[in-house]
Amino acid sequence: MRTTVASFVFGFTLAGAFGCGSAADNSNGPSAATACADLAKAQCHLRETCSLGSFWNNHVYGDPPNCETRATPSCISSLGAQDTGQTPTNIEACVALYSNYTCTDFRDNNPTGACAAPAGKRANGAACGANGQCASTFCHLAQYETCGVCSAVPAAGAACQYGGDCGRNMACAIPTGASTGTCAAYVASGGACLTGSKPCQAGFACVGEDETAGTVGTCQAQANSVNAACDRSRKTAANCDAEYGLTCVPTAAKSGIGTCQAITLVASGQTCGAIGAATITGEAMCNAGGICVKTTATDATGTCVAAAADGAACDSDVAIGPPCGAPARCVPSADGSTAGTCKMPDATKCN
């Protein structure tokens, strides 16, 4: 079982995975602004391809153009970071690879070739804001920070709190009810899976598992078309691909068997969650980066809280909010606090 797009922003990050680097030695190539704009356009377009219509871009950014607007600045700032091993020319080489990327590799953060971060000059332990600054090619950013530390590339089994702790092509597998987990390689189609330890690749669901009993399931392709058959409980068949923009609507009360229907996106202040509650006739999620805040974790519905603007107050507690508009992060104002300020990534300040 994977997290849904409500808490999971799929795809490579502009300033992270690619390690966008200094443009100092790129006088004969493309400018930083051009390379980053091209990369943002390629990424946002692929997100369109890998979801139902404009679902992903609308859910996270509000609309497709804002995806590019929000994605470009952090890449440009990263190009001015010290000690990087990347150039705008290499970024353009990465852009050329996008037509060959599968949605699974994109969503599971598995870049290859020119899209993989190059080695930078900074040793482990040094401050960083982008993978390309580090000799190890991995800048470890805590979940709610914009600057991190160069570290060894995480191995399977390493402790984690979110996907960014695990680097490329690995998930942070967190058992149900736990707050931390371990880094784990994604399981391919037909492989043995178990929530919290053996997660399936993007676009696949773990069918027939029983996490409490430790019974493994099998990774099976999730349905990704409207009216396709599904099993919401994943007991006998896969559910719908929520990251694609679909939810499994049961055809009978108290049944998990049903058909895939498009997830409805609603604005701030509107009701979100399971439409129809007990009988479930659909699902509503928040648009433009908002989150569905519920009175209790067991509530079927809640109210959408809009994402905060850059520089505004935020709270990373999903029961409180507001969150920050991607790719900004809610940087806590004090140790142990979830409240803070929305800050955009800027690798030039990570020294």
Image (cartoon, grey):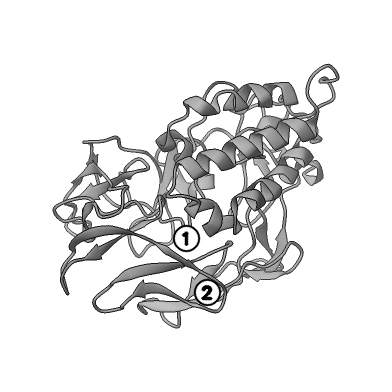
Who is closer to the viewer here, 72 or 157? 72
- Residue 203 in the image: state x and y as whole percent: 34, 43
At 30% from the left edge and 78% from the top edge, which residue is drawn? Answer: 277
Amino acid identity at mark 1: Ala
Vertical position of residue 277 compared to residue 132: above or below:
below
- Which image quarter: residue 108? top left
Q: Most extreme residue toward the top, as rendered?
A: 28
Vertical position of residue 219 compared to residue 260: above or below:
above
Please indicate whether residue 30 sits to the left or right of residue 1 in the image.
right
Q: Which residue is mark 2?
A: 304
- Residue 184 in the image: state x and y as whole percent: 38, 41
Marks 2/1: CA distance?
Answer: 11 Å
- Element type where label 2 sits in the image: strand
Please indicate whether residue 79 sits to the left or right of residue 280 in the image.
right
- Residue 220 in the image: state x and y as whole percent: 23, 42
- Which image quarter: residue 24? top right
Q: Which residue is mark 1?
A: 6
- Element type where label 1 sits in the image: loop
At 72% from the left edge and 39% from the top edge, which residue is drawn? Answer: 75
Q: Is residue 186 visible?
A: yes
Q: How many marks?
A: 2
Using a 10 Å C-alpha cutoff, classify the residue at mark 2 as few (fewer than 14 neighbours), some (14 to 19) or many (20 or more).
Answer: many
Vertical position of residue 240 compared to residue 78: above or below:
below
- Whichever of labels 2 and 1 marks the residue nearer the N terminus, that label is 1
At 54% from the left edge and 33% from the top edge, which residue is drawn? Answer: 153
Who is closer to the viewer here, 111 or 194? 111
Please indicate whether residue 64 sits to the left or right of residue 299 in the image.
right
Which mark identifies residue 147?
none
